[in-house]
Image: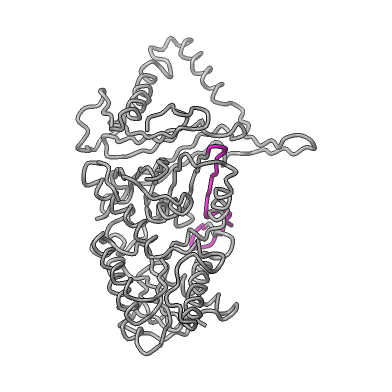
Amino acid sequence: VDYAQIHLNFRSGAVAHLEASWAVPANFPFSTSLELCGTAGMLQMDNSEQSTSIEVYAPGAPISKSAPMEFNGYFHEIDAFIKAVEEKRERAPVDVSDVVHPLEVALAAKQSIRTGKLVRLSSCSAPSAPSAGSADGPSASFAGSADGPSAPGASSA
Amino acid sequence: MIKFGIISYAHVHSDSYAWALKTIFDHDGAAKLVAVSDTEPSRGRPRAEHWGAQFFENYRDMLSGSIVDAVIIASENVRHEEEIAAAAAAGIHVICEKPVGISKEQLQSMQANLQKHSIIFQTAFVCRFSAPVVDAKRLIDSGSLGAIRAISATNHGRYPGGWFGEPALSGGGAVIDHTVHAADVVRMLTRDEFGSVTAFRGANLRPDLQVEDNALIYSRLSRTGIPVSIDCSWSRHDKWPIWGDLQLNIFCEKGVIKIDAFKPHINVSSASGFEWQSLGEDLNVKLIRSFCNAVNEHRASDRRGHGAVPKNSYDHDASLRANFDDGAKAASVAFAAYSSIANNSAPVLP
């Protein structure tokens, strides 16, 4: 599967649409974007379109557009890890439990692509009646996929 | 020249049509706004006076006595059927706001009725005329990117307010209001129809609203099997700088097309707030011009004694013109989405 649309239902009653794609040519920029809509406002981020702060044009060279930062995510990741070790913290900034749940979602999406059905996550209980709550994980996922150019026939119909 | 009437100022777009008609009239006199009707005179009469048009409280009076050749119906969704029937019976051509109807039954009786009359009927799918959409259509039709493999689309918006939140008048919320634009553009670009529709309603962003304001819709097209997602949500808050968007990511065998139909825009800041104003020719002007071409061809054809005009045969933009069937097909996707939501997100055929 090189392209998938994944739907998530949350216990809070919120819904989410995820799109995962390799089905782009090599010159397509690596991009992640996110939009969150809430009762009091909306937040958007898009690393490919909105954040360019320096552009360089030179004869014979490809156009360069970037958004350099004093400290990027890799720096902060290592910095936080070092601090956790130095301060002998009990929990790393991103520990195993932060990895397990997203993986569970991804595996549920694969299962949903296979079966064409919603998958209820085992870590989430009885979500069909939406209840108010915070920090909910996704309760079910629904996924569709397309066979793309690089993996013909890899996905379910 | 084609004489236009506008039925109702209920819709947020009514005055945009008046503006577009004035623009066309000033340019070459091909169309003119001559009359406005509104059940609420305090709303419609001042606008009619502003544009130098005759005002009617009852639209039926406007449809009699050769006052208008064509009408633009911009009333509450539930009223379209009756107004279209009256216009068709009077031989008056119609541009109708979307959705054309609010139920399958309504669409069926509208279709049966329209078949009895020889008028031009156009659904107001303005997004078809958006330059990037037209460009994408050309690119797809050229075959250079190969077949389409998947589409994700959004038609986000602010909550339009008023009767759009009253189901008895609107037929529903964001799903019926916005699914139709995206579904129509997908149909136009793929020349395919929606297969079974699976829809999920999210908890409302505006908890006090009677209708849904966000939902996600998934389908596969019936002939090609292309997976399509549509986000139809009114997820923009009141201060968002533009009413909404139309975005499509079209994944093809040999490339990707990303469309943001309301770009480019200019930033306009004033005491009343901050706005993005789209550049390029006004889409309503293009829509009305396309309609005028069809009406003029219909007149010429009548003079030649050939009767009704088939779609897609004359002017260069005829393939962009959405007829009744296009309006009905797109609305049916929204109806299927409502059925799916009501049936615990089970797939429903439109």
Q: Which residues are magenta?
A: B253-275
- Rendered view: B59 above or below B245: below
Q: Nearer the viewer, residue B50 or B7?
A: B7
The answer to whether A29 appears left or right of A137 in the picture is right
Q: Position of residue B344 (x, y in %)?
A: 22, 41
- Locate residue B254, reporting x and y percent: 57, 37
Decide which of A83, B221 is in the foreground and name it. Answer: B221
Q: Nearer the viewer, residue A80 or B112?
A: B112
| Residue shown at 39% from the left, 75% from the top | B119
Which residue appears at 32% of the width and 29% of the height? Answer: A112
**In x, y percent, where is residue B189?**
48, 51
User: Does the magenta run of residues contain B254?
Assistant: yes
* Colour basis: one colour
| In magenta segment, residue B181 | no
Q: Main secondary structure of the magenta part?
A: strand
Tell me which residue sits at (33%, 73%) in the image: B84
Q: Quadrant of residue B69?
A: bottom left
Residue B48 picture location, percent across and down: 42, 81
Which residue occupies the extreme right position in the image? A59
